[in-house]
Amino acid sequence: MHRKINEAEIEVRFSEVDEMGIAHHSHYLVWCEIGRIHFIARALDIPFEEFKKHDIFLPVVKAYGKFYRPVGVGDIIVIRTFCWGPKASMIHFFYEIFKKETMVRTSTGLTVHILTNQQRKVMERFPPVLEDKIDEAVKRYPFCFLDFRQARLREKAIVG
């Protein structure tokens, strides 16, 4: 299967499971981060280091997750990432995690980020050079970017 631009794959490691052999919930946020960084690098075509070069930081201000089915050691998981609001001062990333073998969804997540500089001052928007890359990505990969209605429906399903 050809991986989509908004998908990352990882193998669940022994250190990520609890005594029952099930991935501990704390690792899901790390997996979301992996998905997010892959998404930014591949879909937006922006190496993560470029954010720092432009004095841009994306701290997490909210994080939510729902767990449906367990994963364990050796399972390959697919992290599918979507984005809403990539040009505003607040950005939402939505995640779906699947067990690759069956492509059954095991969890969903949402992280909300604000756009700041290194001094933690909230920025209004991305610098023009990065906005141009975002515009190109939205045109090239529209399935990766959600409109307001889609984002709210996903948020409601995850947060309640």
Image: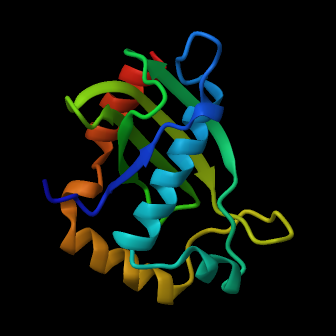
List the single residue furthest toward the right: 119
Viewport quadrant of the C terminus: top left
Dividing the picture into quarters, in which one does residue 90 lie? bottom right
Between residues 137 and 102, which one lies in front from this camera angle? 102
Instruction: Residue 107 in the image: state x and y as whole percent.
Output: 40, 25
**What is the count of numbered marks?**
0
Q: In this view, does 117 lie above or below 92?
A: below
Q: Which picture quadrant has residue 132?
A: bottom left
The image position of residue 124, as x and y in percent, is: 62, 68
What's the residue at 36%, 21% (across, down)?
A: 157
| Up-down relation of residue 20 to residue 94 (above or below) | above
Measured from the top left, where is residue 143 in percent x and y? 20, 55
Q: Which colour scheme is used?
A: rainbow
Instruction: State the residue in front, 20 or 149.
Output: 20
Please report the residue visible at 55 percent of the width from the left and 38 percent of the height from the top.
Answer: 13
The residue most toward the left is 1
In-image side of 140 versus 146 (left or right): left
Residue 66, image x, y percentages? 46, 20
Residue for point 23% across, 33% down: 101
> Residue, x 57% and y 10% (percent of image)?
20
Residue 80, compared with residue 57, is above or below; it is above
Seen in the image, is 115 located left or right of residue 131? Answer: right
| Residue at far top of view | 20
